[in-house]
Amino acid sequence: MRVVILGNGLAGTISGKTIRELDSAAEVIICGEEKYPYYPRPNLIDFLAGLIPQEKVFAFAEGWAERQRLQIQLGVKATAIDPSGPAVEFEDGRKLNADYLVLATGACPATPPLAGLDKDGIFTIRTLDDILELLEAIRSGPDVVILGGGLLGLELARALKLRGVDQLSVVEVFSRLLPRQLDETGAGLLQASLEKTGIKFFIGQEAAEILGEGRVSGVRLKDGKTIPAGVVIIAAGVKPRLDLALAAGLPCGRGVVVDDYLRTGQERIYAAGDVAEHRGRVYGLIPAAFDQARTLAYNLCGQSKKYEGTIPASTLKVVGIYLTSIGLVTPQEKGYETLTDLRPELGIYKKLVLKDESVVGAIWLGTKKGAQEISRLIQSGKKIGEFKNQILEDSFDFSRIFQEN
């Protein structure tokens, strides 16, 4: 069996690794556009912050792929896929035939329709090369403006402060930071914690134009205010890379549409990770990419396995500030109960969302203690029963719940 995987990010790498675990004889070829071997994207933030050297960005030691008998082709760009093969055509004119094809091409940064996007000094951050170029750009000590107060925007902001950027501003169009992961209370507390590090925030504001003659000089907001900047980073989310799938006639919505077995509209073509749309949802999250890649590999190797979805879980990779957001944290419908513990003087906020005595969502801000246990509790669906009044205590022993049920 020959499997060709397009994309050597998390979904592509885990797909290939799992196929090898299940089938020692399979020929697995992983093709990546970047010239670098696989690295977890969160490591880019640590590298940007100066916490790890460049060589520590990569996930595996040299020679790992050879020991796994995985063929890794780097710096190769696919230009077309032939669903009838399936087969892949590359920019250099080569063609690879396969028994199965896996689309793990990920996503690319989304760019809002802004005037002035053609200027020097504007960055989007997705790859190691993006980080290297940004590090070069900040050497002269420019003011930096980040457009977007989501996870990536905040992680970049804190990392740049650790790198010594003095004047740094974050512009967020929504009325609070991390609107998908936090409620008003949690967002306010997080903003206060980040402001103490010297980051300025413009909340509920929208950029209208990037200013400058040839090179960035600032950002003009829609209310007329101008923020000086020598570097502007756009962190406005990502969009699945659908060009190959669309050209091949594969069903696409926001992503490449897959069934519960991660198959696309063609039986021998699968998709996983940021490019995939499952049951109308594109996750864009590491846990979902991991789950999908593992499930895909089992099915491709003849072991039927359904993907039932992944409970959204996000962790903020910001040094000194701990945040985990899991599941449903701002329910709009009736029938939910919330438990909260707010200690603003310590920067701590815990919130649990309950449905029929089971925890279905949680915000855990300012402390790591109990975060993993809460995640496990949500995944299990266990009822917390008599422990409802104790569960938010710092000293609570979560094993009591699992023993009871």
Image: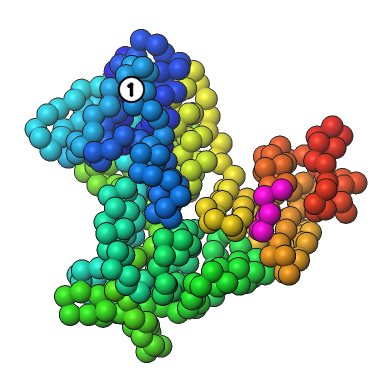
* Label 1: few (<14), some (14–19) or many (≥20) C-alpha neighbours in 10 Å: few
Look at 25% across and 22% down and name the residue there. 98
Q: Tell me which corner region of the image, top left, top right, bottom left or bottom right, holds residue 320.
A: bottom right
Magenta-colored stretch includes residue 367: yes
- Extreme top residue here? 25
Is any atom of residue 157 visible in this view?
no
Q: Tell me which corner region of the image, top left, top right, bottom left or bottom right, holds residue 385.
A: top right
- Residue 37 percent location from the top left of the image: 31, 34
Look at 37% across and 78% down and name the residue there. 207
Q: Quadrant of the C terminus?
A: top right
- Extreme bottom residue here? 224
Q: Which residue is mark 1?
A: 63
Q: Relative to 231, is 370 above or below?
A: above
Look at 27% across and 79% down and name the residue there. 217
Q: Tell me which corner region of the image, top left, top right, bottom left or bottom right, holds residue 333.
A: bottom right
- Extreme right residue here? 386
Give the magenta part as a residue range: 364-369
